Amino acid sequence: MVKKKTNPLNKRFLRELKSEAGKYIVLFVFIAGVIALVSGFLVASGSMSQAYDESFEKYNIEDGNFEVKREASSGLLDALQKDGTKIYPNFYKEEQTKNVESTLRIFKKRTEIDLECLMEGSFPEDENEIAIDRMYAVNNKISVGDVMELGDVSYTICGLVALSDYSALFSSTSDMMFDAVRFGVAIVTEDGFNKINDDHLHYNYSWRYSERPADEKEAKTLSESFLKTLYVNALLNLNGVEGFIPEYVNQAIIFTGDDIKGDNAMFTVFLYIVIAIIAFVFAVTTSNTINKESAVIGTLRASGYSKGELIRHYMAMPMLIVLIAAVIGNILGYTVFKGYMAALYYASYSLPTYVTIWNADAFVKTTVIPVLLMFAINFIMLAEKMSLSPLRFLRRDLSRRQKKKAFRLKTTIPIMKRFRMRILFQNIPNYVILFIGILFANLILLFGFMFGPLLDHFEQEITTHLLAEHQYVLVSEEKTENKEAESYDVTVLKTQEGRYKSEEVMVYGVQENSAYIKSSIADDEVLISNAYANKQHIKKGDTITLQEEYGEKTYSFTVTGIYTYPAALSVFMNCDAFEKTFEKESYYPGYFSNEELTDLTQKNIAMTISKEDLTKTSRQLRLSMGGMAVLFQGFGVIMFALLLYLLSKVVIEKNAQSISMAKILGYSDKEINRLYIRTTTIVSVVSLVVTIGLCIVLLKVICEVAFAEYSGYLEFYMEPLDLLKVLAAGLITYAVISFFQIKKIKAIPMTDALKNVE
């Protein structure tokens, strides 16, 4: 039996690993880190997503809810339940808490619909006990055993819960963002519920169809039919509709699931972009190695080695690195990073408990696809290189293009500048990849830096352009003794479905020469808020069409001006024109006031709007995303440093013979640095400046698309100082990398000039 000979090329692996240890260690750590991060996220989000999907049946989540002015009559309930739909009373009361400045929405313990998940402690059994939302408790540093003051009533907190219909703490489905700091939900016993006065009692009812809708289209059809029945029968039974929220548009229910699944796609794309860039870096460094070893490759090919053997040899190390990195990354993802990512979601949402599940999709996305991506990019490059004849390798003639004389550079250009220009033209492929990498790194870095200032700017704009310190919407007309208060009329309409989803729009009828609306509005004028204009790209002279919130009647208005009010989508009309347009029973009276109105009947106040209500978006986003912003900043700097180190190293290695010859000719290390390091410096600095400009454009588009799905408007803003921070971070990183490359140039011996001389 003939013993199979070992391929002698395999002996080169250890030597190559030793000589290129720095490169491979950096790439291994970076790839493993990215895969660990994404794997941990996908495992956590996959497990949570499954727990979220299962919660609809497990906790019997509603298909929608509606609110009426007074307790529904038996006639109304019978009309709604004719087709097998079940209606469940789900009344709640809202009270201001004394422990912390917040509003608590209190339900009776539910036993049939929208069940709760116990996270800590126990459910309330006594009239003096209350179980509050876990997320609300964490954000306000409240624990089991604490006493909570609600108006004149005190409760002992017996447990922390997650309400299945409030996985995201939206107090209203029209809110742009939920607020888990100033708004919370809780459950008490029936006796405990009756202890609270009825000033803020809401006659809320939840419904379940006889069968769950198959998809959102069917849910919409069913809800429209349900609304018609509700609207007609509520009028017949003298009971006005105050609210109507089908499950498929209820942000408190669907926001969490949409966000988890949306983040899943974002992280996956992020991983693929990073792996593709790293694969190109591997391809460039391998191409450089082939150029250096072209004579050896030519000899091997002439000696009988096939193209396949050589392709497998040069692909072995990149594939081994990415494969080991993927395995280690997944192990870290399932252990360390899974918990970290789950904690980020639990820091934002009131999710029920979840069990970690094996995620085959995550394995494919973080292991199979990155390995295939690395294989494909490197194989294409190597196959193209190895298709050359052995003679071309022996002659070191590896260019695909027909050799042309280098284009002449004017002799008036100083010799050192001409030399640097030659270096630039010879390394264009490397610099193109460097530019793309810097673009991606700066995009991540800028997002990390812009996040805090964007929210600060949003808060500043809102607080600077408030309509009033306090806005009151009343159930019925009521006089106040406060001379600062100014009355107005208001109704809520909604935009029509189209390019953007339907959103609530507050339509104000304001007094002539209003002290709060700093604009004189004639009878034939309609102003819209700049938030409305900017979000939906509406200009002066355009016509907008709005429709009733719970009916089919539509209203068209021609926009005659834009009013600076960034807090919400709003329309402003003269009070007389407002009253001519809308029927009396379809709108509410209200007051603007810079002082709190204490003489109004609490039960008559339908809604209050203050600075705290308008800034909930920035407050919650800062709480939810603050940690991620720091992560983006660190990742952007690391990626920039990695690409700069590897590609500048390739440029130096590619020109090692020329550098050696320059030393023989008497050029000092300082002069050589001016040639090679300065060229890369110019490319890097230009790339930094240019990509920062491109990133601003890209981020503006990304933010507009991302925030289009949210109610309200969040304006894109970039702090000028942040641009300088990104530039400074890039320059400091480059300075550190340059130090190592200068040492590398200094270490190149003069003997290299005598090698591979044609």
Image (cartoon, grey):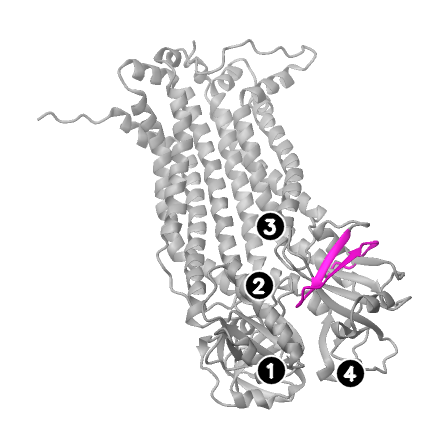
Q: CA distance from mark 1 to mark 4?
A: 27 Å
Seen from the viewer's position, the closer of residues 64 and 281 is 64
Write the start and end of the magenta stretch as one range.
Answer: 543-567
Q: Is residue 55 magenta?
A: no
Q: Is residue 737 above or below residue 476?
A: above
Q: Residue at x 55, y 74 (%)?
A: 137
Q: Are marks 3 and 1 in contact (CB under 8 Å)?
A: no
Residue 448 disc label: 3
Which of marks 2 and 4 precedes in the sequence? 2
Q: CA distance from mark 1 to mark 2?
A: 23 Å
The location of residue 164, given as percent across then percent down, is 49, 71
Name the secondary structure under disc 4. Answer: loop
Q: Quadrant of residue 176?
A: bottom right
Residue type for callout 2: Val
Q: Which residue is mark 1?
A: 72
Residue 570 disc label: none
Which of marks 2 and 3 precedes in the sequence? 2
Q: Residue furthest left?
A: 1
Which of marks 4 and 1 precedes in the sequence? 1
